[in-house]
Structure formats: structure tokens, C-alpha cells
Image: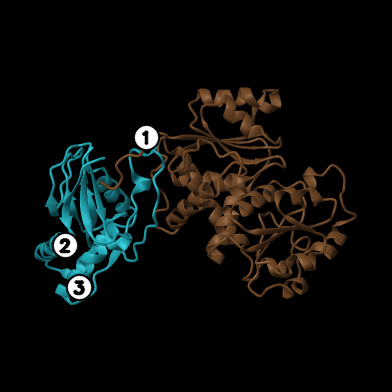
Amino acid sequence: MKWTRKHLLDIESLTADEITIVLDTARAFKAVGQRAIKKVPALRGKTIVNLFIEPSTRTRISFELAEQRLSADIINFSTEASSFKKGETLKDTALNLQALNADFIVIRHSASGAPHFLSRVLNAHVINAGDGAHEHPTQALLDTFTVRERKGKIAGLNVTILGDILYSRVARSNIWALKKLGANVTLCGPSTLVPKTFEQMGCRVTYDVDEAIRDADIINLLRIQHERQRKTMFPSIGEYTQLFGLNKARLAKTKPDALVMHPGPINRGVEIDSEIADCDRSLILEQVTNGLAVRMAVLFLLNGGKGPQGVAGN
Amino acid sequence: MPETNVILDATAIHRALTRIAHEIVERNEVSEEVVLVGIPTGGDHLAARLAKILSGIWNHAVPVGILDVNMHRDDLDQRAAPTIHPTVIPFDVTGKTVVLVDDVLFSGRTTRAAMDALNDFGRPKKIQLAVLIDRGHRELPIRADFVGKNAPTARDEKISLRLVESGAAQDEALLMKK
């Protein structure tokens, strides 16, 4: 099985085999990060534009470093310093970047489907770095990579995603990836943020946090996305913490080898207790390290041509 | 149906590796400086076999590493993305004589990529190249120091090395004609 896709737009359209190729490739790239010289020439001479129309720190930095470690030339484009302020449309901005012979466009946008739109109007490879509340494919890939590395498998694991599911692209991408790889997914959070419609994606929905995490192998916490909520969907932060925050008492009632994940940025004392964020069952910083390897793998795979396989090894 | 010829059987492969091992011994007086680095797929298994023979001759263990060269290839955007294997070099190559081990030497581009990749791990004192089969058609000024068998081939033929380590019933090298 070979990787033949030109773009990475979402997890929904990927097959389990394709997800596995990315995870296997990322394993090799993770090792590159442990060398004295952390750079390989795989994307030498390629130009990558990081088009971040919505603010982002960790994803942008992770992509930038991944691109640099593959020896690509990069241009960073952010809302504050761009012609969007002057009224240029997304399509025109993208066409201008293409006129500069950009080979890859990494886009983060507040509108769902923006990367799909660009993939239809551009010749460049398009990577979705998060589009609205739709998908965040590289986050799901790095999360599944982290789970597989720590647990040795994905199939059959019980994964509980806890928090704001409704507005979370991370949740959607994770659900697709986990279901395709055979995990059992449970969703939990305030009922306003975890609609029953997610059961159509093959998930179990519950509003009792202790029950949701009791048999979990992985507990993935999501941040409350204040910026995406039109009005408050629950009475107060304090009440959210009381009902759904992960604290020591709650974690004590889970499986002893259950691990805690969070895509960041974490709100200490809101969805996660400080103590838990820093404990040895927390994978939060490993997720950051793995994110770099996964993004290098994605860039490397997309760069492959469509032509026939050369005579490898000889 | 493509025509297939066995160019090396299990005995011949073992004999070739034994001879290469003795040539490595002959060429390198300071045995402690020699490390083997195999290139997947194929070369990694051959490197492990050579290390076993060499440690029998030298009476000490010979370090073996695995080097995936795909991140350093010069034709990455001309073909589907290759399958990458983890690189494992559990020793410092600086000051060592690194014997690169590959199954088949063809264009020489894999060897070039391997030498580039090796530079990222340190500065070896020497790099030597051992291959089981040299099939000709070089595109770069590269030659092997140790060759198991010279096999004249046409450019569009394919050589396939099957080893028991990768699940084959028996060791054999096959030449497949178009």
C-alpha cells in the first residue's frame, strides 16, 4: 500500500491503511528529532506557505519546525500582517501565493471547508491545519500516534473524549481516526456541548463523567472553546470544573493504566487539575513532541510524486 | 509470465557473505574500528549476518546499525513516497570505519544518499561499501569495496533478494526478466 494523496484535508476521507502509513512514517521521523543533526534534505528547494488566517501558536510553530527540519523554504502569513485587512479574498491571496510557486499551503481558517476550497483552485499541496469546527487532521494523527506508541495498538481501546465536543474540530478528527482504527469512543461533557447526534458517528454519548472514564484506557480532555461559542452553553466555569473537570479523586476511580491527553492549550484548574497535568500519566508534552514527527511525515508523504515506484534499494 | 532465474541460492549467499567477511578482515587491521551499517530492506539483514561471521573471526562483537536513506534520496518527488524504516545507529560513527551493507548495487544513488545520511551522525574515518550483488548501470562515480557477485543485467530487469529474516522459505536472489 502506497500513499497517493496530494492533499491532507480531513480524516473522514482517509482509510485505516492510509492513517497507518502516516503513523509508521512518523515513527522514523520521530527518531530524526533525537539525532545531533535534526534536519534531513527531503524537501530541499520546496516552498511552503503557512497561511494562518486564524490565530494559532502551537500548531503553527509545530508546522514551521517540521518544515525547517525537512529543509523547506517557508513563508509565514498571518491575519494581522496580511492583505486580508485590505479586503482581499482567500482565493486571491492563495492565487498570489501560487504565483510565487509555492509547493505547499498549510492553512488554518475559521471557516469549515476553506482548505477543501483551496485544494480545488490551486495546484499546490494543501494541508488543513484546522478549519472552523470541522477537522484538525494532524492533531488526530498525532493523538493516535501517541496512543499507539504508548498502548501498542488502537483497536479495542476505550477512548473517552471529555469536554466541548460540539465546537471541537479536534474531537471530530479524533473520532474519525479512532473509529477507523477500531477504538471504542465515548463522548462526555455538558449536554449542550455533546449533542446525541454524535451517536451517528458510532460513539457512545454520556453525561456522567465518572461513568464515562471508569473503563477508559485514554482520557482526552478538550478545552472549552470560548471563542467559538456564540453564547454561554453552561452556567459557569466553576460549575463546569465541578461537574466535568478531571481531578485527582476522579482519576483515582479510573483504570490504573489510563492515560490523560490534551491537545493544548490547557486551562489549569478548569478542565484539568494542575497536579494531573504534570503527573506521569499525562501525555500532554509527548503529544507536542509527536506532533512534530507526524507533521514531518505528512509533508514527506504528500511530497511523493504520483509516478510509478522507482527501483528502490538497488 | 516473466522469466525468473535464480542467480544465488542459499549456499551461494552464505559463501559470498563468508568471503566478504574475510575480505573485510583483510582490509581492516584494527578490528575495533569497524562498524557495520545496513540499508533496509535487505542490507540490514545482511549486515547482521556479516557481523555474526566477523565476530567469530575477531572474537569480539561487531556493532551493527540500520540506516534508512529515503529522507536523503534525490528522486523523492518523482515517485510515490517510499516506505520509511526506522534508523537505528546505537554507536558513534566518528573515527570509525563504517562498512555500508546493501543487497544490490545498481545506479549508486542509494549509496550516495547513505553517505549523505551518515554525515548527519558523525564523521567516520572511512566508509567502505559491501554489496551482495553488483548489477551494473551506475549513474554516479561509485564502486563497491566488497562484492558477493557481479551479475550482468539489462536495465529493465529486476533483482529480488529473498531472505529467511523477511519471511522467505529459503534464501535466494532472483533475476526477473521483463
Q: Horizontal and vertical percent for residue A294?
A: 52, 50
Q: Chain of mark 1?
A: B
Residue A2 point in image, percent of width and height: 44, 44
The circle on residue A65 is none
Pointer 2 chain: B
Q: Nearer the viewer, residue A5 or A223?
A: A5
Q: Is residue A242 left or right of residue B44?
A: right
User: 10 Å neighbourhood of mark 2: few (<14), some, or many (≥20)?
Assistant: many
Residue positioned most to the bottom: B59
Q: The disc numbered 3 marks a residue on which chain?
A: B
Which chain appears brown?
A
Q: What is the CA distance from the residue labelled 1 to the residue labelled 3?
A: 41 Å
Residue for badge 3: B55
Secondary structure at badge 3 equals helix
User: Where residue A181 sits in the image (x, y, percent)?
Assistant: 58, 54
Using the rendered image of the protein, determine whether residue B155 is visible from the camera's viewpoint. Answer: yes
Q: Earlier in the sequence, mark 1 or mark 3?
A: 3
Question: Would residue A297 appear left or right of B34 to someone viewing this image?
Answer: right
Q: Nearer the viewer, residue B25 or A309?
A: A309
Q: Could you tell which of marks 3 and 2 lies nearer the N-terminus?
A: 2
Badge 1 is on which residue?
B78
Chain with colour cyan in the figure = B
Task: Classify 10 Å Cα crowding around label 1: few (below 14), some (14-19), many (20 and above).
Answer: some
